[in-house]
Image: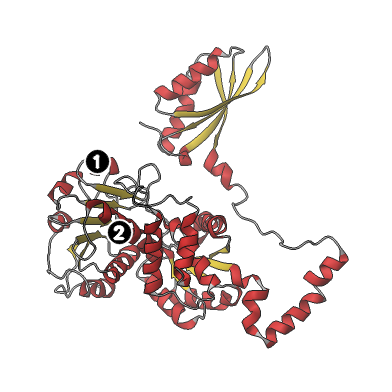
Amino acid sequence: MAATASSYSITMRLHTDPDHGVVGAVATAIAQAGGVVTAIDVTDSSHQRLVVDVTCSAADAAHAQLLPEAAAAVDGVEVYRVSDRTFLLHIGGKIEVTSKVPLRTRDDLSMAYTPGVGRVSMALAENPDDIPRLTIKGNSVAVVTDGSAVLGLGNIGPGAALPVMEGKAALFKRFADIDAWPICLASQDTDEIVRAVEMIAPGFGGINLEDIAAPRCFEIERRLRASLDIPVFHDDQHGTAIVVLAALTNALRVVKKSLDSVRVVVSGGGAAGTAIVTLLIAAGVTDVVVVDRAGALSADDESLPPAHRELAAVTNPRRVTGDLRTVLAGADVFIGVSAPGVLKAEWISEMAPDAVVFALANPDPEVDPAEADKYAAVVASGRSDYPNQINNVLAFPGVFRGLLDARASEVTIDMLLRAAEAIALVVKDDELNPNFIIPTVFHPDVPKAVAAAIRGEG
């Protein structure tokens, strides 16, 4: 079992015999158990014992429980305490509110609060257009969820969704200097969610819908876009679509194919799949087939539910039928936003030459990227431990930065297309290769380029 990313990282506090050779023995034992030691600190040393903190990475939660057992099996070692570093990071939450102005004196209070603040409020009552300029509204986003489709965890509820929404808010601040608030609603009723967001909207410059299950998310977004004068953006749909289009644009540059000539198969007809298909068609793709559990969606199938019927109406021009393997034969591109393990690596050999495979189910993709790489010319996934990570962080901070700067009231397809192009162009010709089709989320040019594209600059 091989260790992977730091999301499964633990720190063990060990009490050992006063022999520094024990430290090396512990490191060896952890390595033999498949862990990766990333830090060893002797925090206390005496003639009676050593106190040693050992930090190491594991493959998953079960593996992380085995590593302390490996350390304890070394002669002269007692495992005193084990801490999960990811849980430690979340203690007390990940975000906070701080004041941008000094509040040290009576003079400070008289301007920031009463009586001076009353003058500002009266001015805004008379000139509402100044609210974004004189309040936080001009740089604020509500990250709204009902907890019904959180990551790949399913319907875990609004409270359990809060750490994810906090993380989203932290990313907004880190990558676009936007102040975002997690809003976790105790309802999964469409009418109640729409009304709740409408009621809080005056305090925000934009609404980021997050982790709301399909098909409810479609109606919520549609109704909010119609009723609000600020942009509404469902990141699971449009953020994913932007980054997929950017990555596909560059992957096709690698294999020397064009968007208007490729056959694309999308596994998954939910929120992300629908948005990806919509944006791909807008970008010029003419042959897209969507496959769900029952097989290929086709306009000939009158038994489809309404959302899938709409999707089938604009896809599958050849009216193909069958399961994923059948539909995939001869296709140039596979895009998975569905479930783990639905694509067998050997099926890729039945695709067109120089196949492109995006296996984006998270945390476990449709096919092991390492196995897919044996058959495909370009492979991408949602994971950070393989090349070509398709990550929404590349899109949503810059998108909202541009929307807020432009005081935009809506999000358009043209904006999404420009954002995808901006991300793709960050990867220069001399950088582009099968293992680098998309920039890292830490590339400083990405949010700036996306924001400029949303504003229509450049």
- Gap between marks 1 and 2, in whole Å? 23 Å
Residue 260 seen in the current view: yes
Quadrant location of the N terminus in the rendered image = top left
Task: Locate residue 80, reporting x and y percent.
Answer: 59, 26
Residue 293 visible here: no
Residue 198: image x %, image y %?
A: 53, 78
Q: Residue furthest right?
A: 106
Compared across the picture, whether 204 is left or right of 60 comes to: right
Residue at horizontal 12 percent and vertical 64 percent from the top: 321
* Residue 96 in the image: above or below residue 386: below
Q: Amino acid at mark 2?
A: Thr
Badge 2 is on which residue? 249
**Callout 2: SS:** helix
Q: Is residue 44 left or right of residue 364?
A: right
Question: Is disc 2 surrounded by few (<14), some (14 to 19) or many (20+) residues within 10 Å?
Answer: many
Residue at the spot x=24%, y=41% of the render? Answer: 371
Q: Earlier in the sequence, mark 1 or mark 2?
A: 2
The residue indicated by pointer 1 is: 371
